[in-house]
Image: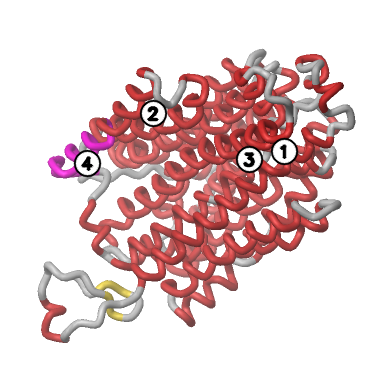
Amino acid sequence: MTLSPARKNTVALAAVCLASLMFGLEISSVPVILPTLETVLHSDFKGMQWIMNAYTIACTTVLMATGTLADRFGRRRIFIIGIAAFGITSLLCGLAQSASMLIMSRFLQGMGGGTMLICQVAVLSHQFQEGKERVKAFGAWGIIFGIGLGFGPIIGGMIIAVSNWQWVFLVHVVLSAITLILVFSGVQESRDPHAEKLDTAGIVTLSLAVFGLAYFITQGPDLGFNSPAAIGIIVASAVSFLVFLFVEKRNPHPMFDFSVFRIRNFSGALLGSMGMNFSFWPFMIYLPIFFQSALGYGSVAAGLSLLAYTLPTLIVPPVAERLAHKYRPGVVIPAGMFTIGLGFILMKFGSNLPHPSRLTMLPGCLLAGIGLGMTNTPVTNTTTGSVPSTRAGMASGIDMSARLITLAINIALMGFILVEGVLSYLKSTLPQSLDSSRLRSLAEKIAAGNFASLKQGFPELSSFDPSGSIVHTALVHGFGLVMLYGGIGVWILAAASFVIFAPLKVNQNLTSNPLLEVTCGDRPCED
């Protein structure tokens, strides 16, 4: 049966939307099941961090390479490979019997997910080239992607409640098979005859730098930050990053064209990308632990509570677009980041009340989600719209890379702050006779919310903390520091973004100088 062009476009849009739904669900549904994974896979807090970060780092690794490969060998072909890889690796995740196997499977799954993500935009851009149809297609894609992110927590919680954790991953095997059928039926093949060579050196050096930094933060306490191994890791990461800067400067076709950073709108919006992933998205990985362990909710109740955090990200963007058009992105993006930070401060206040609950956390969660919704769409439109159309793909790649790199680093940093916060409270409360390494192990188990194993692993707690109040307060104290870090950090980025966005006041005669980068209203004054 031969489909008409209009029918093929509809099928292609369904395929892209289903792929975006899978990608969104895989980011937001997994955090809810982390406490369960720690118990059933007998893992520790660092293992839980790597289950999330393996996926993020893998997405970063393939992000820039996928665009070049798709342009050269065919966007439909690479899209099919990405979907198939995502389905197969989701099966491996569901069959994992240990944390190490799940981490490795998650890394491979992230490579498939990153490939899918980049190809979605390329397929839509080719399949829908007319103005009105293009707007509708990208609008539908954005809504479905938002639904995946917004409803992922409750879906993950419900799966745990009615079945088992494996189906959080196995559901993507079925969805991948359906998506492949739709791709074969409706997606057209397209290539770029002028596709550039793959920037292998840039991809490898940047990936090593990000992985090394995340590893240093996560494993540093065990290695000892002053140990030769830890120092070697951070030095190697710094060298990798310096080599990355060098090869990108020398490469005639770099994946990162640093000249775009001189465009004020682009750089200001890029700080918005970093701000969202500095605070909002990495904290979503730890927030289910707070709801389940500190507040005592089950997985479904925790997922429902997280809707206050995620749903505004789906509802607010249309309003944010109107605000950006009226007041310009240079005002709306910093304001959105400031709102995220205010939400974090309110969450800290709500968590420190005498009887914290999801109601005391509700105002902060809502405000953080509203801030994310205000920031996300204007950031995406501004990063691509502030550069010439010939460099829009590269600008989008830098934007997505900045998001994922910031996310990977802050997953590690927030975990480090959480453990150190719990540990500092335990040191100030429990007897000094406890061994420091044993105390750190206790802090990691508390930070992971693994209270069930405490009595067996630490029998001395029965005499020091028979009611469990010290353990509970230590966890709340650690989370309070994480919330403070997220709030103040995003406020600093908001201020920097506002300053960078601010237009330069220069003499009219100077704007013709190509060495000067200025802004004219909402757009850069350049060719």
Can you identify the residue that label 3 sits on? 285
Rendered view: 271 above or below 37 = below
Horizontal side of 317 relative to 442 (left or right) equals left
- Compare marks 2 and 3 and give the one earlier in the sequence: 2
- Compare marks 4 and 2 and give the one earlier in the sequence: 2
Question: Residue 389 location, x and y as percent?
Answer: 29, 62
At horizontal 30% and vertical 51% (from top left) the residue drawn is 394
Residue 498, quarter of picture: bottom left
Can you identify the residue that label 2 sits on? 212
Can you identify the residue that label 4 sits on? 245
Other residues around mark 1 within 10 Å, as few (<14) / some (14–19) / many (≥20): many
- Compare marks 2 and 1 and give the one earlier in the sequence: 2
Name which residue type carries label 1.
Answer: Leu
> Quick one: which residue is furthest to the right in this view?
467
Distance in Å between CA atoms under marks 4 and 3: 31 Å
Distance in Å between CA atoms under marks 4 and 2: 16 Å
Callout 3: helix, strand or loop? helix
Residue 516, quarter of picture: bottom left
Callout 4: helix, strand or loop? helix
> Which stretch did the figure color magenta?
240-254
Other residues around mark 2 within 10 Å, as few (<14) / some (14–19) / many (≥20): many
Other residues around mark 4 within 10 Å, as few (<14) / some (14–19) / many (≥20): some
Question: Residue 330 location, x and y as percent?
Answer: 41, 72
Can you identify the residue that label 1 sits on? 475
Distance in Å between CA atoms under marks 1 and 3: 15 Å
Nearest the viewer among 438 and 501 is: 438
Residue 152, quarter of picture: top right
Callout 1: helix, strand or loop? helix
Horizontal side of 473 relative to 218 (left or right) equals right
- Compare marks 1 and 3 and give the one earlier in the sequence: 3
Distance in Å between CA atoms under marks 4 and 1: 40 Å
